[in-house]
């Protein structure tokens, strides 16, 4: 089988790694894999060393006819069985470039929501007539797609693969975060967007005034005094919440934490911050939205609460804040769950099986 993957690897190493390791795993499994991405990307050399052909390519826009023609020349010459694309620019470019060519077209979907039959923009990407199949990052994402896809389209779930050996950041010194020896450190890593549910988290923290040792660290864009300072004051949380803003060392802060939380209210996929928390054996509390509840086995490797429910979230925070043995048990189980359910090897095998099903269905 010959596949062409179209993506962008301008992001950080940790963001690119699961996707790039999937490509390497496919190549080592005997799938002839060509990746169209930036030649100088952070993972290009490792992909080449792993048997992946890397072609320097980056769409210059969502619909750029120069990029479309260039990719079409590559696809025609490569005689690929499948072209698999990963972001909106790549998906639109690959859909148009593959018009009239014999390969099957597959797209990747990483979050729930925002795909509707009545939305014309969706017909440029996942609902385009050229698309044969969609690979979703979680079953919740696949379920959100199925009511909207065309009958002839297949939808598969493939969890992004991870390796515990990737997560080796030394924990930051807790004192540098203003955390004292007896404090319980709760960390939330997310950009402060409405769907991330930060106000719900602050409402839950306000219910725990009898737990002065529970301290919350907020990391991400918009997690700063200018944005959230007034909200902390209104809820009486000044001194209990650290607004750390964007940090390159967010995984190291998670590694130093006692527990983590992602209070999202909608449109999650398979959140990276939750995976990082679990890999560092830090028990997570998540909401039942998107793939979060697939990552976390409720009551075994963390806690799952309804979205937009400050009371339920407060109860979960209280439980883990006051039960150190439960935190330890959940944390170890969370780490093991990443190793057993979300490995690179499983992602490679599931992707290869999906490709074979797509090609078989098309030829049957």
Image: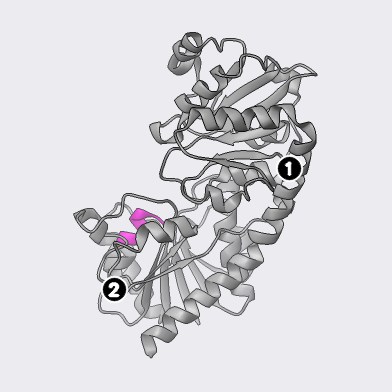
Q: Residue at x 61, y 59 (%)?
A: 161
Q: Is residue 213 above or below residue 346?
A: above
Would residue 325 be counted in the magenta stretch?
no
Mark positioned earlier in the residue sequence (2 or 1): 2
Crowding at dot 2, Cα within 10 Å, few <14 / some 14-19 / many 20+, comes out as few
Residue 315: percent from the left, percent from the top? 60, 30
Q: Position of residue 10 (x, y in %)?
A: 49, 48
Residue 2 shows in the view: no
- Residue 297 appears in the rendering: yes
| Residue at the spot 58% in from the left edge and 64% down from the top edge | 22
Query: From the viewer's perspective, is residue 343 above or below residue 193?
Result: below
Residue with the mark numbered 2: 151
Checking the image for residue 331, the label placed there is 1
Left or right? Give the position of 45 relative to 114: right
> Which segment did they paint magenta?
86-92
How many numbered badges does the structure rendering display? 2
For the residues labelled 2 and 1, the Cα–Cα distance comes to 42 Å
Up the image or down, 26 lies above or below 327; here it is: below
Q: Please give left or right for residue 183 compared with residue 284 in the image.
A: right
Which residue is more in the foreground, 308 or 269? 308
């Amino acid at each position: 089988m010959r596949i062409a993957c179209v993506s962008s690897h301008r992001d950080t190493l940790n963001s690119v790694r699961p996707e790039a390791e999937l490509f390497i795993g496919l190549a080592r499994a005997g799938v002839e894999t060509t990746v169209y991405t930036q030649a100088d990307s952070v993972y290009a050399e490792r992909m080449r060393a792993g048997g992946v052909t890397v072609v320097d390519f980056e769409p210059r826009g969502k619909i750029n006819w120069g990029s479309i023609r260039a990719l079409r020349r590559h696809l025609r010459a490569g005689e690929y069985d499948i072209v698999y694309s990963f972001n909106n620019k790549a998906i639109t470019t690959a859909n148009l470039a593959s018009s009239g060519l014999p390969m099957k077209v597959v797209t990747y979907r990483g979050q729930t929501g925002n795909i509707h039959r009545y939305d014309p923009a969706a017909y440029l990407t996942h609902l385009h007539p050229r698309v044969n199949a969609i690979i979703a990052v979680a079953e919740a994402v696949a379920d959100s797609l199925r009511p909207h896809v065309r009958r002839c389209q297949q939808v598969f779930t493939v969890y992004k693969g991870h390796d515990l050996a990737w997560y080796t950041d030394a924990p930051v010194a807790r004192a540098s975060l203003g955390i004292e020896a007896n404090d319980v450190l709760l960390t939330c890593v997310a950009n402060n967007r409405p769907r991330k549910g930060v106000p719900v988290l602050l409402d839950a923290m306000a219910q725990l005034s009898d737990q002065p040792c529970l301290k919350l660290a907020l990391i991400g864009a918009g997690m700063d005094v200018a944005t959230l300072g007034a909200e902390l004051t209104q809820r009486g949380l000044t001194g209990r919440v650290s607004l750390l803003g964007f940090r390159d060392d967010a995984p190291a802060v998670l590694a130093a934490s006692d527990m983590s939380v992602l209070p999202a209210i909608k449109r999650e996929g398979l959140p990276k911050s939750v995976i990082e928390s679990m890999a560092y054996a830090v028990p997570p509390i998540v909401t039942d939205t998107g793939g979060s509840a697939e990552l976390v086995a409720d009551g075994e490797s963390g806690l799952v609460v309804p979205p937009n429910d400050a009371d339920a979230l407060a109860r979960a925070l209280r439980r883990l804040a006051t039960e150190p043995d439960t935190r330890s048990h959940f944390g170890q189980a969370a780490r093991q769950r990443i190793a057993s359910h979300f490995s690179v090897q499983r992602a490679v095998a599931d992707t290869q099986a999906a490709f074979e099903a797509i090609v078989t269905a098309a030829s049957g």
